[in-house]
């Protein structure tokens, strides 16, 4: 029997492609790695990731696409090209799962839900010539969650993505994870996770769980077994993940997290006042209270772990003054790095359903307008602000957060609190990267503002920057430079390429 070729494609929003080829901000599409693992070895598999190269038509027997909402219209463009050439196209992932009726208009087959059940059945039908228009995988049993096939990731990704669980009961207003992955945590066996971790080859690990330490009984003990197991097995990798405020509830969890290589945790803070937290249905944060957040940050810093806080702007109750107060909270809170985004109604969320019913979404020419749903552009107003006002305010806020002097001040504070040069580096790099993403248009086309190095374009360098340049040069010379050179060599080796820009 002749071998068949499966082409797996990760599309990228072409409007936001300016900085997407930075390896430190491009994550391997783990879902496609799972699809590859579920595919029999009678198939040849190729991955094409538009974070690194633009898709062009090439031979294949079957094309598989995945896409976040902001990339969906690009995915449909790619699908049209391959279908015109007579190659059937399948699409799954979060966007296709949330609105399969739309996706079905642009591809031959839609996969809804998780792949473990759907994909083997789809391939059997394809090979027998009976491919169906829809396959619903639902929620996979935890024992059947597939390991990731990593040999397809030929690009210079800095991170190996690993999942230890799926599911989230939180049901935040703006998030579709609960809809996609269910309300219950499905936890993989810790020993299986450790076995997988022993096989990863890239310098950094990102645990993609929505809550690495969940709120079920025994979750803290499970986390300790995982982190302690990494130390005992000699898995020496810096790692990052996502967690809620309860990550800091147990000092032993924090100790072993730091000991096993944790340098930065993305934590959903979202807002600085009860009204906005209530808008977001961020119940855990609301229950604990904004005044408790700083204590969580300091407990994590004590173990050498930085906090990457996510803050959202544009909740229903937000006024102009409220947005600036949230900016001021960021600057004084002690957060080490910040992901600041604009509230965006994604399909599958209660926010989207409500805003659509109220005719509040300003971009509705779908699928083309999905390209605006990337969190850096307002797609709806608040009770007090329209979208142009939000856009203007956010530009000012982002400039005050992400300019070079401020992110350098944040870095030195992180270094002081964590006593970790590595945690300080990743906090600094995260702020730099988020700034470039948030201010991409300003950097590219505005004569004022900041450049790609986050330096002011039309202002002299401050005395603070000139004085601390020498300190930064010393830190690079004694620590960061060596770390980055070692990482670069490891990334190239993992990608199988001597060239870091494939």
Image (spheres, rainbow, N blue to C red):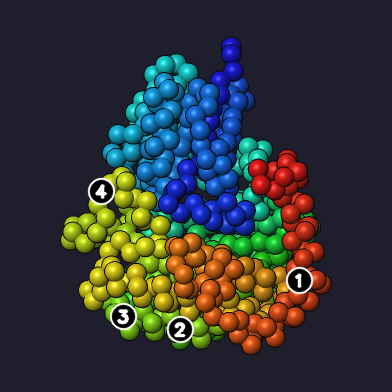
Between the residue at mark 2 and the residue at mark 1, the CA separation in whole angstroms equals 30 Å
Can residue 318 be seen? Answer: yes
Closer to viewer: mark 2 or mark 3: 3
Q: Which residue is mark 2?
A: 329
- Distance between the Cα atoms at labels 1 and 3? 40 Å
Question: Label for residue 129?
Answer: none
Q: Looking at the image, tell me whether mark 2 or mark 1 is earlier in sequence order.
A: 2
Vertical comparison of 424 with 218: above or below = below
Q: Which residue is mark 4?
A: 365
Residue holding disc 3: 320
Q: Is residue 85 above or below residue 71?
A: above
- Labels 4 and 2: the sequence-earlier one: 2
The percent coordinates of residue 203 (x first, y second) are 71, 55
Asked if disc 4 and disc 3 are in contact, CB closer than 8 Å, the reply is no
Vertically, is 342 above or below 331? above
Q: Residue at x 39, y 45 (%)?
A: 72
Residue 397 found in image quarter: bottom left
Q: Secondary structure at mark 1?
A: helix
Q: Quadrant of residue 314?
A: bottom left
Which of labels 4 and 2 is toward the front?
4
> Extreme top residue here?
1
Q: Which residue is drawn at the image coordinates 56% and 71% (left, top)?
A: 454
Distance from the alpha carbon under mark 4 to that under mark 2? 36 Å
Callout 3 secondary element: helix
Left or right of residue 32: residue 170:
left
The residue that label 1 is drawn on is 476
Mark 4 neighbour density, 10 Å: few (under 14) some (14–19) many (20 or more): few
Between disc 2 and disc 3, whose residue precedes? 3
């Amino acid at each position: 029997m002749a071998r068949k070729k499966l082409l797996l494609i990760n599309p990228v929003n072409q409007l936001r492609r300016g900085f997407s080829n930075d390896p430190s901000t491009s994550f391997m599409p783990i879902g496609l790695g799972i699809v590859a693992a579920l595919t029999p070895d009678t198939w040849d598999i190729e991955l094409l990731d538009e974070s690194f190269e633009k898709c062009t038509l090439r031979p294949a027997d079957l094309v598989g696409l995945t896409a976040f909402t902001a990339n969906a219209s690009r995915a449909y463009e790619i699908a049209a090209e391959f279908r015109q050439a007579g190659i059937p196209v399948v699409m799954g992932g979060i966007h296709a799962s949330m609105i399969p009726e739309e996706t079905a208009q642009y591809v031959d087959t839609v996969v809804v839900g998780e792949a473990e059940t759907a994909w083997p059945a789809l391939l059997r039908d394809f090979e027998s010539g009976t491919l169906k228009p829809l396959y619903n995988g639902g929620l996979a049993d935890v024992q059947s969650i597939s390991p990731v096939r990593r040999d397809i990731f030929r690009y210079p990704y800095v991170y190996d993505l690993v999942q230890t669980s799926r599911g989230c009961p939180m049901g935040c207003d703006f998030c579709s994870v609960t809809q996609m992955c269910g309300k219950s945590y499905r936890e993989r066996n810790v020993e299986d996770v450790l076995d997988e971790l022993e096989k990863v080859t890239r310098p950094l690990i990102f645990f993609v769980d929505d809550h690495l330490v969940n709120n079920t009984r025994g979750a803290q003990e499970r986390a300790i077994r995982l982190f302690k197991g990494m130390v005992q097995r000699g898995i020496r990798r810096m790692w990052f993940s996502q967690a809620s405020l309860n990550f800091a509830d147990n000092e032993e969890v924090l100790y072993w997290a730091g000991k096993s290589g944790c340098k930065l945790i993305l934590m959903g803070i979202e807002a600085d006042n009860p009204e906005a937290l209530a808008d977001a249905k961020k119940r855990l944060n609301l229950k604990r209270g904004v005044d408790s957040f700083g204590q969580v940050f300091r407990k994590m810093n004590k173990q050498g772990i930085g906090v990457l806080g996510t803050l959202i702007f544009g909740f229903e109750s937000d006024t102009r003054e409220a947005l600036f107060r949230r900016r001021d909270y960021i600057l004084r809170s002690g957060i080490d790095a910040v992901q600041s985004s604009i509230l965006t109604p994604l399909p599958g969320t209660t926010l989207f359903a409500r805003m659509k019913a109220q005719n509040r979404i300003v971009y509705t020419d779908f699928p083309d307008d999905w390209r605006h749903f990337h969190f850096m552009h307002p797609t709806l107003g608040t009770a007090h602000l329209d979208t142009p006002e939000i856009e203007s305010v956010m530009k000012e806020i982002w400039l005050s957060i992400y300019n070079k002097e401020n992110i350098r001040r944040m870095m030195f504070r992180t270094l002081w609190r964590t006593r970790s040069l590595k945690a300080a580096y990743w906090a600094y790099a995260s702020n730099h990267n988020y700034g470039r993403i948030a201010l991409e248009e300003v950097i590219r086309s505005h004569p004022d503002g900041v450049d790609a190095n986050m330096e002011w374009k039309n202002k002299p360098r401050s005395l603070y920057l000139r004085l601390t340049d020498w300190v930064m040069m010393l830190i690079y010379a004694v620590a960061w430079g060596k770390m980055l050179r070692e990482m670069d060599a490891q990334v190239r080796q993992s990608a199988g390429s001597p060239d870091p820009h494939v």
